[in-house]
Image (cartoon, coloured by chain):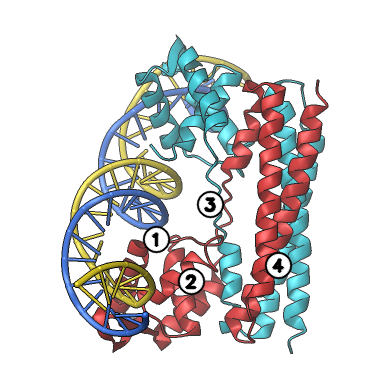
Chain colours: A red, B cyan, C yellow, D blue
DNA sequence: AAGCACATGTAATTCGTTACATGATTGC
DNA sequence: GCAATCATGTAACGAATTACATGTGCTT
């Protein structure tokens, strides 16, 4: 009973609107791709379990076996209680940063290259997010309003990463 | 053969100095706690596999069954090739941010509380890292030099998080 | 009729966490 | 002698990824 975040991600999306597994996957592959990635097999599995335990119900069936899921009151209660009564798991994992610890086994030139690539990648991602922000037509529904807050986080994160990687690159270059 | 980052984390630590599983766990629980957390059972398991495939060897046995592992040339080659020839997996997962998407199911007051808590938590973590930076006696060995770069990342990250959460809190408060 | 998007599901494997299980040495 | 620390290992479970497997309906 410890984590089960995917479960709540699915509930959260269905609290905004009724959807099928296929619909949800589009959201997981776009808006949530950098926040809580999930695979198709995970999502379909979770929908089945949630419907089995009464937090969701199949509210309509469409062509090609499509099943539309709707959140139940029990599901909304569970979602609210997750948001209010539980603390998020704040475990961080960064392979990029882990590698920094081991740059000592590389030559200074190789290390500088590594950090330059990271700076460039962060800059690219930042640009991509700016493009996205301009492109999306932000409604005033909940997911738009709060999704924009999340996107702003991404903008600040990638800006910070670029600055840090450039700084770190200069530090390493200065060691010689 | 896709990820196996823990494998390389272990190799990386042993490239710096010979150590036992017990020694490595102290590093995973401190320096690497916010970068690449690992459990004791994972680490001991990985040491066994790495020794079995010749990337490490048991260079000494001490009291209480202690085994000291030393990286082999093959292990160093593998570590370098991981650093140079492979791209880090940059998958990000943030339960904190996921929750932001769903704040629409809470009342404005509840949402403001959530973001305030996150701002405070980021500020706390930032202070804790500053304390750590002052406290550690930074040598000029590789792990110290590169560990400091990683710590600076943590300082910049937590500062950014506090600013963002405060800004987001004000945004949400302004909706009413 | 062909191609693409829609649509769902299962199986196998790996990675990670928690809990269990055991014991030796050192310092007080 | 007792407590703390040192020290390693296994078992069970849950979460996540990849690959497989199959089929329908719409548009041109």
- In the rendering, at what x and y percent does residue B169 appear? 74, 74
* Disc 2 secondary structure class: helix
- In the rendering, at what x and y percent does residue B155 appear? 76, 47
**The disc numbered 3 marks a residue on which chain?**
B
Q: Are marks 2 and 1 on the same chain?
A: yes
Q: Is residue B42 above or below residue A176?
A: below
Asked whether the beta carbons under mark 2 and mark 3 sit within 8 Å of each other, the answer is no
Q: Is residue A126 above or below residue B132?
A: below
* Left or right of residue A117, residue A36 in this image: left
**The disc numbered 2 marks a residue on which chain?**
A
**The disc numbered 4 marks a residue on which chain?**
A
Using the image as rendered, state which of residue B32 and residue A60 is in the foreground: A60
- In the rendering, at what x and y percent does residue A174 appear? 83, 27
Q: Earlier in the sequence, mark 2 or mark 4?
A: 2
| Distance between the alpha carbons at the discs numbered 2 and 1 | 11 Å
Q: Earlier in the sequence, mark 2 or mark 1?
A: 2
Location of residue B96 (image quadrant) = bottom right
| Distance between the alpha carbons at the discs numbered 4 and 3 | 18 Å
Q: Which residue is mark 3?
A: B91
Q: Which residue is mark 1?
A: A39
Q: Are marks 2 and 3 on the same chain?
A: no
Q: Are marks 1 and 4 on the same chain?
A: yes
Query: For the C terminus of chain A, which image quadrant?
Result: top right
* Left or right of residue A104, residue B49 in this image: left
* Left or right of residue D23, residue C18 in this image: right
| Distance between the alpha carbons at the discs numbered 1 and 4 | 25 Å
Q: Residue at x 68, y 50 (%)?
A: A122
Q: Is residue B48 above or below residue C19?
A: above
């Amino acid at each position: 009973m410890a984590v089960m975040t995917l479960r709540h991600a699915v509930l959260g999306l269905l609290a905004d609107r009724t959807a099928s597994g296929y619909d949800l996957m589009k959201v997981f592959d776009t808006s949530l791709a950098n926040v809580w990635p999930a695979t198709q097999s995970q999502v379909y599995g979770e929908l089945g379990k949630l419907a089995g335990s009464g937090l969701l119900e199949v509210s309509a069936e469409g062509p090609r076996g499509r099943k539309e899921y709707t959140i139940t009151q029990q599901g909304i209660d569970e979602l609210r209680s997750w948001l209010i009564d539980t603390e998020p798991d704040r475990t961080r994992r960064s392979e990029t940063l882990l590698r920094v610890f081991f740059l000592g086994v590389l030559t200074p030139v190789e290390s500088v290259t590594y950090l330059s690539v990271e700076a460039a990648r962060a800059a690219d991602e930042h640009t991509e997010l700016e493009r996205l922000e301009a492109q999306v037509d932000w409604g005033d529904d909940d997911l738009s309003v709060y999704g924009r807050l999340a996107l702003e986080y991404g903008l600040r994160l990638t800006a910070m990463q670029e600055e840090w990687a450039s700084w770190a690159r200069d530090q390493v270059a200065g060691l010689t």
